Each structure stands twice: as C-alpha cells, then as structure tokens.
Amino acid sequence: MNGFERIMTAMRLGQPDRVPISEFLIDRKVYRHFFPDAESQMELEIAWDMDAVGCGAEFFVTEEINKNEFVDEWGVRYKRNEEHVAHPVKGCIFNREDLKKYTPPDPEHPGRLGRLPELVSRFKGGKAIIFRHRAAFMWSCYLMGMDEMLMNFILEPQLCHDLMDLVLDANIRVVRRAVRAGADIVVLGDDYAHNSGPMMSPEVFAEFILPRLQKMVDAIHEEGAMVIKHTDGNIMKIIEPIINTGIDGLNPLEPTAGMDIGVIKRLYGDRVCLWGNIDCGDLLSHGTRDQVEQAVIKCIKDAGNGGGFVLSSSNSIHSSVNPWNFRAMVEAGKKYGEY
C-alpha cells in the first residue's frame, strides 16, 4: 500500500498493511535538525516516507506592532514565540457593537488555502492530503478572549452564539474550498479540555460547541472528505457526543491527561479511527530511544488491533521534542507496525 491507501483504509476502520504514521504539525527546529534548508515539514515527510502531508489555511499579517507582536486578518494580536504557532494575546470583539462592525477574513482570498494546491499537485493519490482548520470555538476565543468567552457563555449567551455563527460560516466556506481543491481529510483543531477535564460543562458544550461542530462535520462530509477531530486534554465527559457527530478520526488522546488509548479502542474503536498517542511532553522531549520504542510497541498493541489506528504524537512535534526521539518513534512504528 502507499500512504494514501494506508491512511484511508485506517480511517474507514480497516486494517492496512502496516500501522500508518502521520503528524499534523512538526516544528521547524525539529525538521531542520535533519534538513537544514527545508522550508516546511514536507521535506521530512517525504524523506521518511510518512503516510500523509498537510497544511493549514493561511491568514496573513495586517500590522506589525513590533518585532515580537503582530495583528492578523482576524484582527487578533499575537505574540511570537519558539513554537510554529504564535500565541494570541488580545482580541477585538468585546461587546455587541464590536460584533456589528466586524468582518471576518475573506474565505475566497486566493492565498487562503496555503500550500494545498502544491500538495495536491505532487501527492494526490500517493499520500493522504490533510488540511488543518477549525470550526468555531477557538477563533471565537481568540476574538473575545478565552476567559471572557467562557464567562459570556453564561453572562452574554446570545453574543457568543452570534459570534460563533459568524466564525463558523467563514470557516465552513474555507473548508469547502479546501476539499474541492483536493484535500482528502480535514482536521479540526479546536481544543475543548484541560488535563483535568473539559473547559466547560457538558450542558454548555451541548448548547454552544456541539451544534457548530456538527455543522462543520456535515459540510466536510457533503464535500466528500473525511474528518479528524483534534482536541487536547481529558474529553471523557464529552467524548460520546463528539463521536456521535460522525467524525471519522479522533486525535490526540493525550496519555498525560488520562486518555488511555486502549480503553478508547475498546469503547469506540468500532466507530472512529484513533490517532495518537505517544507522549510529546516528557517522553519525546527527554526520554531515551528505548523508552520511545517501548511506548510505540505498547500503543500499537493497545490501539492497533484490527486496524483503525494511526500512530502519531499526543499533540504535535513541538520545538522541545528531541529530534532523534521523533525519528525513533517513526522508525519503531515501521518496525513493529506491520499487520
């Protein structure tokens, strides 16, 4: 099988020739350790014969505040850091008047799909092509502020509903374009939980988050692509409704948040493909090669039986990951992942 066949077989809960291996995001510090002139993680994915390639929607800088801070098309102010993704520090919607004046980024912008056309041209049918985006929650939090958003679910519920609908509409339009341009899978990156549990009660999740996730999942399926839901943290209190939306894959199932991939496999492995869950915190950053290999063996044993599993990290390959440990993870996946 090639990478596309391997990933898509697993996503359909089948058993490919070996466990597929993929990462949504690899920090430049890690991939440039092996490929100093690489412009993206794609060079590593090709050289290591990983099973998928991917990119995300592009939102451009509209104002440089200083060398460390900038504003993007969403009107959100960010602070640059060591990671690939900058940290949001200030939104622009604080009340209903702000929302009335607000216009989200144009989904039809010619550069919105980023490197997707190139990936489709080079890899369509050979590797699974993954497009990273979000539904409504996280960008709404960026626009309003996380704490303010969570408080306003109770204090200003209609403001939250209206903001999230505006964000969702723009994001659905971007995703429809991406699938029509050739994306095989869309991964939705809104996070819903901390290590201790969801950020909000199951009742609040059901009112504000779930209906919009459902609309995004339905839109992606209507266009003919598959969906992976990514969310950090312990999601056990809300995992059932998430899976009920019809998602095809679930990621990253963080072990440090108590997400036991073996338990999830027994409970939901006949309904959703599992992506994960090698610890990218302590293990991939500070562990030994043997410890990484043993974790991969256990993960495959717990989640790989019968297929429906893709080996990946417990979040992303961030800047603190030991590059050689990441390589050990990929090599162990190929060595021990044959069915």
Image (cartoon, rainbow, N blue to C red):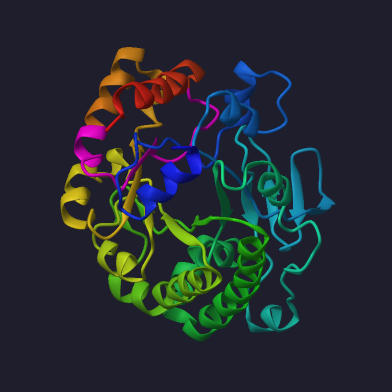
* Residue found at x 35% / y 32%: 279
* Residue found at x 73% / y 56%: 59
Q: In which quarter of the image is the N terminus?
A: top left
Q: Report whether 312 appears left or right of 182.
A: left
* Residue found at x 63% / y 57%: 182
Q: Which of 130 and 147 is in front in this view?
A: 130
Q: Does the magenta stretch include residue 131?
A: no
Instruction: Please provide percent x and percent y for residue 2.
Output: 48, 37
> Is the residue 137 above or below the residue 35 in the image?
below
Q: Is residue 305 magenta?
A: yes
Q: Which of 182 and 160 is in front in this view?
A: 182
Instruction: Please provide percent x and percent y for residue 205.
Output: 36, 71
- Quarter of the image for residue 293 reads top left
Residue 260 in sight from this viewpoint: no
> Is the residue 110 above or below the residue 172 in the image?
above
Q: Which range is magenta?
A: 300-321
Residue 193 in sight from this viewpoint: yes
* Residue found at x 51% / y 19%: 323
